[in-house]
Amino acid sequence: MANLLRDLLYPFTRPTPPASRRATGFFTDTTLCIGCKACEVACKQWNQLPSDGFNFTANSYDNTAQLSATTWRHVKFLEQFPPSDSAPPSPPDMNLDLRSLLMEAQNGRWLMMSDVCKHCSAAPCQMACPTGAIIHNEFDDVYIQNDICNGCGYCVAACPFGVISRSAFDGHAHKCTLCYDRQRDDLMPACAKACPTESIRFGPLDELHEHAVGRLEEVKARGFKGARLYGDRASDTYSALGAFFLLLDEPSRYGLPDDPDTPQRHMIGDYIRGAAGTLIWVAILAIAVIARAPG
Amino acid sequence: MPQAELSAARVVTKAPPWHRSVAIDLLCSSLAAGLFAVAAIIYLLGDATDRAVAMVGFVLAFPVMIVDLVCLVIDLGDPLRFMNMTRVIKPGSPMSVGVWGIVVFSLVSFLCFAISLVGIGAYALPFLALFGFPFALVVANYKGVLFSTTAQPGWSSMRWLGALISISAGSMGVAVLLAAAALAGVDDPAAFLRTALVWILVVYAIVFVALQREGDRWTRAARRTFAAGMWLTVLVGIIVPLAIALLAAGPETDCVAALCVIAGSAAFRDVLVKIPHRLDAN
Ligand code: SF4
Ligand code: SF4
Ligand code: SF4
């Protein structure tokens, strides 16, 4: 009985939050990713997440398919090759050098990207969460308090990047914690630590931004005209991302929304339209009651 | 299609783990709120005969709300933590707003239910009806906004969804109380409820058309995928009861009209909940 009471009351206690620290995040430079999946493995290992099985997805070298409650890092493989029914490839050009092999898209290329929660600075999942389970922690990262979440699933519906999902195991929502436990002990997140090419770079956000701008210039100078930063700054419709990316092509090619939209931007207008509809039917009924023939 | 093109055409978001019980919850919350709000208006503005009809609304609203509460709780991944919804008040989260609306509405509708059934403390009914009325409207309204302020394909561009769900709640409340009045043989309330039903269904139809005209490529895809469900909503939920109310008034036909309005509302909610799942699978 005492235990039950404690469990019921515990979520309503309010411990003092830790003092704010310097905001941290990820800069993922997809041009450096070699698709080794060390980040995926390191994340699973550190967070004791179960394997999703070695499934054949018919999608390149991908066997985890998507981010989920048990996969908080997911390496995407995007094959950009001419369609198989187009003209057969011309015989190999013996003058090809490493540079043209790597850079000429018409010869086909693989884009690889280690995807993760974007730790949005104004996170729709956090705004939607009705229990207050999702918070921005002292590192300004988006964190789900697993002891509070009741698995309503609203955060799943609210995330424009399809990151969060509800676990069938405990019924709660899960996603990348940005290795909150490791950060508190001044350790680098497991995925960034494991990444052999520094495609995943962790650090204070201001430093990451500075590095990303320099890196973009470098990549562009090497001839990748389509290179761009994704989520490094806020747009008209979405906040800046705490985990932002350097991409070589349109975001949608990587399965990212080109122009993410904050769903809650529309909330006031939707309430007003809802209230207008309500007012109309209430007025119709009230008039019908009052204006009917007396007696 | 080359693989990279394919990823550009896919739905990025994940469908929430909401299925049939959410559709039932959506229907029951609208029906309970609609019944209570309609009953409150009739009780506060009407005469003694009207009040008797209104009390039927109070008696029906609470049991329907109980079914809704059960669905709400079993929808959760961890139902034992339902009370965690009341840890915070977040005006920026339609679900939080709705939960608080439901908490107050459930209490008030229980009191109105008990008073109407037992008949003791009837002097409190007008105050409870007045107090509960805005909360009933919150319950009727919030679910539409809850769905439209997500990132889900189909839902996220339905700007009139809140209005539609609320009008459908009102239409169900009026239709059920019309059937009750007609069955009880009280012609006067039945007559004005019939007039109200006709006009509310006309507004329902207009907002439904507005909803069909708006939206992005996902909404258009949803309309194509769920054309049958959408037509069922219009035919069974709007056209048939409208025709009955205009052409064939009577206790039996009014009951058929009420059942049609509820069935149409159920069909729409069933389609609504399925949209992101089906688009995701496509
Ligand atoms: S990416 Fe999705 S889950 Fe991550 S913080 Fe942003 S909204 Fe939340
Ligand atoms: S599932 Fe959990 S984290 Fe997500 S919105 Fe609901 S309570 Fe919050
Ligand atoms: S930061 Fe930690 S939890 Fe997040 S993806 Fe990396 S290893 Fe996993």
Image (tube, rainbow, N blue to C red):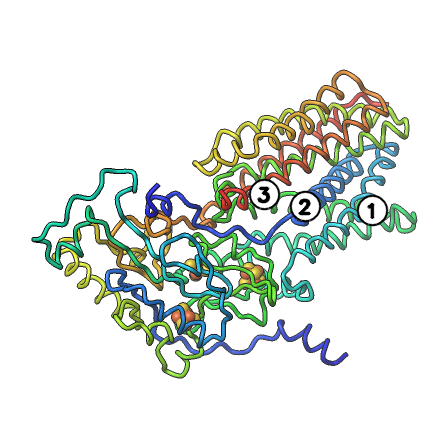
Residue located beneath label 3 in the image: B274
CA–CA distance between discs 1 and 2? 15 Å
Q: Nearer the viewer, residue B130 or A277?
A: A277
- A178 or B173: nearer the eye? A178
Secondary structure at badge 3 equals: helix
Q: Position of residue B41 (x, y in %)?
A: 75, 37
What x and y, as percent, mark residue B233?
A: 64, 30
Give the labeled residue for mark 2.
B134
Q: Is residue B146 visible?
A: yes
- The residue most toward the front is A91
Label 2 element class: helix
Q: Name the front one of labels 2 and 3.
A: 3
Mark 2 and 3 residues: CB-CB less than 8 Å, in contact?
no
Q: Farthest residue toward the left?
A: A95
Residue B123 position (above or below residue B50): below
Q: Position of residue A291 (x, y in %)?
A: 74, 24
Q: Which mark is residue B125?
A: 1
Label 3 neighbour load within 10 Å: few <14, some 14-19, many 20+: some
Q: Amino acid at mark 3?
A: Lys
Tell me the kind of residue under disc 2. Pro
